[in-house]
Image: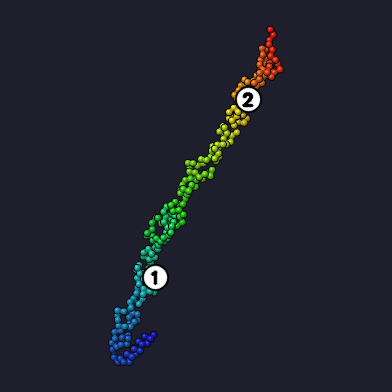
Amino acid sequence: MKNLLILISFLMLLNVCDNSTEPKDCMGISGGNAYLDNCDVCDGDDSNDCIEDCADTWGGTAFLDQCGYCTGGNTELDPGYADPGCGCEEPAPQLYCADNDGDGLGSGDPQLICPADLTDSFVTDCSDEDDSCAGDIYDCAGVCNGLSVIDDCDVCSLPENFNSSIDDCQVCFGNNEDMDCNNDCFGTAIIDDCGECQPPENYNSSMDDCQICFGDNSDMDCNGDCFGTATIDDCDICSDGETVILHKLPDT
């Protein structure tokens, strides 16, 4: 304000003292070369005249940024707005994680990558718990993408060993203990006293009346006593032994 008052006083003094009939310049000096530039600045130095910026504003501060857009000044545009980090007019970088096993899931710390630099080894899903196992799928044996499964005996087995713990009677870990001597599952046949595999109703059926295996009752005497001593005497009578008949000699 002080400088403005000094300038006004100076101009008034010139007007009082200047009786020239020559046109006055913007500073009130007759025949002077001062002029008003486009920013209404009065001086005679054309080297400091205001210029028009890229937004067509005289004396404005807008300028062309690295992408060739008029920014700053009164444009309300920030310099570099068209370059979010990957080049002018290119999409902004995004966060990606490395996908080492190719299952579409990544792991590790996310990193910003421009689309132009993106490869198939990076994905946006960073939830992979084990990036060395595609799909994070493990079989019951803990093998990545393995084939083992839990069989009917609750045993983790490969396909070729599935249910290998089941015996012929379909009993887990049974060892065929439910098979009888006739190889019938849950059968009732057993080995009898003659060493034969027989159902209960035929147990010891190979014994004769004297309890001799495979015998023909030849150990039975004529009185029907096993291992008896009765014999047929000369009179063709079964006598002696457990009989009440004594052996008689024929009359002479």
Image quarter for residue 107? bottom left
**Quarter placement of the C terminus:** top right
The picture places residue 239, in percent across and down from the top left corner, at 68, 16
For residue 206, side relative to residue 3 (left or right): right
Q: Can residue 143 be seen by looking at this rendering?
A: yes
For residue 206, side relative to residue 145 (left or right): right
Local SS, label 2 = loop
Mark sitting earlier along the chain (1/2)? 1
Residue to which mark 1 is pinned? 78
**Quarter placement of the N terminus:** bottom left
Q: Residue at x 58, y 28 (%)?
A: 195
Query: Which three-letter amino acid code belongs to the residue tagged 1?
Result: Asp
Using the image, tell me which numbered label, if any, was put on residue 211: 2
Mark 2 Cα shell of 10 Å, populated few (<14), some (14-19), many (≥20): some
Image quarter for residue 124? bottom left
Local SS, label 1 = loop
Q: Give the residue at the far right of this rendering.
A: 244
Query: Which three-letter amino acid code belongs to the residue tagged 2?
Result: Gln
Query: Which is more toward the observer, 116 or 218?
Result: 218
